[in-house]
Image (tube, rainbow, N blue to C red):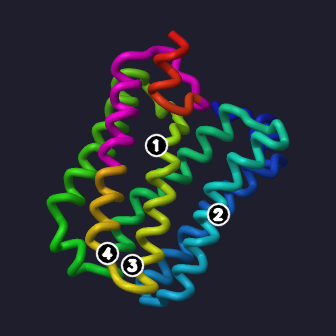
Amino acid sequence: MIDYSVLKVEFRRIPNLITLLRILLIPFLYYFAFSQQKILFVLFLTLAGLSDFFDGFIARKLHQTSQFGAQFDSFADDIVNFSVLVWLWLFIPQFLQLHIVLVSIAFAFFLIFILLELLIHKKRLAMHLYSHKFTNLLLYLFIIHSLLFSPSESFFLIFVLSVILAMLEGIIIILFFKNISSDIPSLFLLLSHK
């Protein structure tokens, strides 16, 4: 059952409005990708990336962090992360075909991470690990660099390695810890608090 009074309060918070902006940008990103409008796509993707950074930053500065905000931010990230494959396929299909094995491996780790969350904890945990934030940053930078210049093999390898390591960190946390807070920054800090 949805508590609309909670939603009303949550959507008055600036960080959640910034996250909502990221979600509202996604249809435009699809349109620009399908119509091959690289510059507009890059501009809107940059806005989406900035919103990804600023929603959490502003939430902490304004003391407006909440479980809803963490879940909402993760939901927006998931939509962008799943969309990336479509966008890359539309803009740089040859590069993606050439690296389909690496893309498949990284995507498999991402799916395993999500499935384990759902199987073990019965929900998405909305963990905001430093490794996940770094990987999202690399994701935005790789796409922008690829569209403005050309896809870089070394940048792509660094990005894929980052995805695998970030998902492994999340998988370890999911498998070996209970009552996981969304503001746990890393496995190492989690271990140091035990």
59 and 35: which is toward the camera: 59
Q: Which residue is mark 3?
A: 146
Query: Which mark sits nearer the N-terminus, 2 or 1?
Result: 2
Residue type at tag 2: Leu
Q: Which mark is residue 1?
A: none
Gap between marks 2 and 1 measured at Cα: 17 Å
Gap between marks 4 and 2 measured at Cα: 22 Å
Q: Which residue is mark 2?
A: 50
Q: Which residue is mark 1?
A: 131
Q: Residue at x 55, y 72 (%)?
A: 45
**First to last magenta residue range:** 163-183
Query: Which mark sits nearer the N-terminus, 2 or 3?
Result: 2
Eye-nearest disc, 4 or 2: 4
Q: Secondary structure at mark 3?
A: helix
Q: Are marks 3 and 4 in contact (CB under 8 Å)?
A: yes
Principal SS element in the magenta part? helix
Across and down, in percent, residue 65 comes to: 74, 36
Residue type at tag 1: Ser
Q: Residue at x 29, y 67 (%)?
A: 154
Q: Callout 2 environment at 10 Å: few (<14), some (14 to 19), or many (20+)?
A: some
Q: Are marks 2 and 1 in contact (CB under 8 Å)?
A: no
Q: Residue at x 43, y 57 (%)?
A: 81
